[in-house]
């Protein structure tokens, strides 16, 4: 009987762990209070769960909860695609509303940039260059959209093109608007990514565009990445689903569109 009870408790814990990880992938962050209420268990039980998952390297503990692991490598592209899907769709629609027919655009790598491409299906007469191969079939559904694909090294993990050839492709143009993402955003307003080759492309895109739109959901505020792209002062508009909580961040922000 004792052994059976232990097995039942272990099975319940494993189910909780799986659901906690799924919530973290979907929302970017989980809280002790929220999980305790959702699973109808004690705060101590959830803290133990989060400590176990952190010890396995599957979550990073933060004050009051946990976030997806951050550091030198990004999470998988499919996991990123599912993370804050609704928010990314809203950001995509809001960014598309900023774009007038007949514009020339650059659309960068990332699932939020992909959401912007999806929201452009009814725009007319766009010229779009992209290094995001996931965006190409989405944009091709718009018969009036002219699509240019950069050269570069194919990054198999997310079908992105990066490197010196990509930057060289970008330098041939002056875009009306660049749409870029980032992997992390710190409280000073600096944008970061994991791949230096992608960072160089993003910096070149900013230099080669009359205006730049940063699209980033709230999960980017709780993550870290090593390579600096630029600061919020280098972009024209920031579209996000997160209100600024840091006075320093707000001070450095461009025009903010909260979706």
Image (cartoon, rainbow, N blue to C red):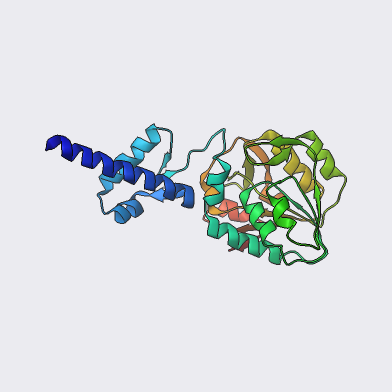
Vertical relation: 153 (above or below) 140? above
Q: Which residue does the image show at 43% across and 37% down from the upper left?
A: 58
Q: Which residue does the image show at 71% across and 48% down from the upper left?
A: 108
Apparent side of residue 181 relative to residue 222 in the rendered image (left or right):
right
Apparent side of residue 138 relative to residue 38 in the rendered image (left or right):
right
In front here: 84 or 1? 1
Q: In which quarter of the image is residue 127?
A: bottom right
> Which residue is outermost to the right?
172
Vertical relation: 81 (above or below) 101? above
In front here: 11 or 169? 11
Q: Which residue does the image show at 83% across and 42% down from the upper left?
A: 169
Q: Where in the figure is residue 120, as x and y percent of width and height?
A: 71, 62
Q: Can residue 102 be seen?
A: yes
> Which residue is outermost to the left?
1
Q: Can residue 244 be seen?
A: no
In this rendering, the count of numbered labels is 0
Pick the quarter of the image with the N terminus.
Answer: top left
Apparent side of residue 148 relative to residue 3 in the rendered image (left or right):
right
Vertical relation: 22 (above or below) 151? below
Q: Where in the figure is residue 125, as x and y percent of width and height?
A: 83, 64
Q: Where in the figure is residue 67, as x and y percent of width and height?
A: 45, 44
Q: Quadrant of residue 240?
A: bottom right
Q: Which residue does the image show at 70% across and 51% down from the upper left?
A: 135
Pick the quarter of the image with the C terminus.
Answer: bottom right
Q: Where in the figure is residue 233, as x and y percent of width and height?
A: 70, 51
């Amino acid at each position: 009987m004792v052994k059976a009870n232990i097995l039942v408790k272990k099975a319940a814990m494993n189910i909780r762990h799986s659901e906690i990880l799924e919530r973290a992938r979907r929302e970017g962050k989980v809280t002790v209070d929220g999980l305790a209420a959702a699973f109808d268990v004690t705060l101590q039980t959830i803290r133990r769960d989060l400590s176990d998952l952190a010890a396995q390297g599957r979550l990073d503990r933060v004050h009051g909860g946990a976030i997806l692991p951050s550091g030198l490598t990004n999470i998988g592209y499919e996991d990123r695609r599912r993370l804050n899907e609704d928010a990314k769709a809203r950001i995509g629609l809001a960014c598309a509303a900023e774009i007038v027919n007949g514009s020339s655009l650059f659309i960068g790598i990332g699932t939020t940039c992909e959401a912007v491409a999806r929201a452009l299906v009814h725009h007319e007469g766009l010229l779009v260059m992209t290094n995001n191969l996931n965006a190409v079939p989405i944009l091709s559904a718009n018969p009036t959209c002219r699509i240019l694909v950069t050269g570069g090294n194919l990054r198999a993990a997310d079908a992105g093109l990066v490197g010196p050839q990509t930057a060289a492709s970008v330098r041939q143009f002056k875009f009306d608007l660049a749409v870029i993402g980032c992997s992390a955003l710190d409280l000073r307003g600096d944008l970061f990514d994991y791949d230096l080759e992608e960072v160089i492309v993003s910096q070149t895109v900013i230099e080669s565009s009359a205006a730049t739109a940063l699209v980033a959901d709230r999960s980017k505020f709780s993550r870290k990445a090593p390579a600096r792209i630029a600061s919020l002062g280098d972009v024209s508009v920031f579209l996000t689903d997160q209100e600024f909580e840091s006075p320093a961040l707000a001070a450095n922000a461009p025009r903010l569109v909260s979706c």
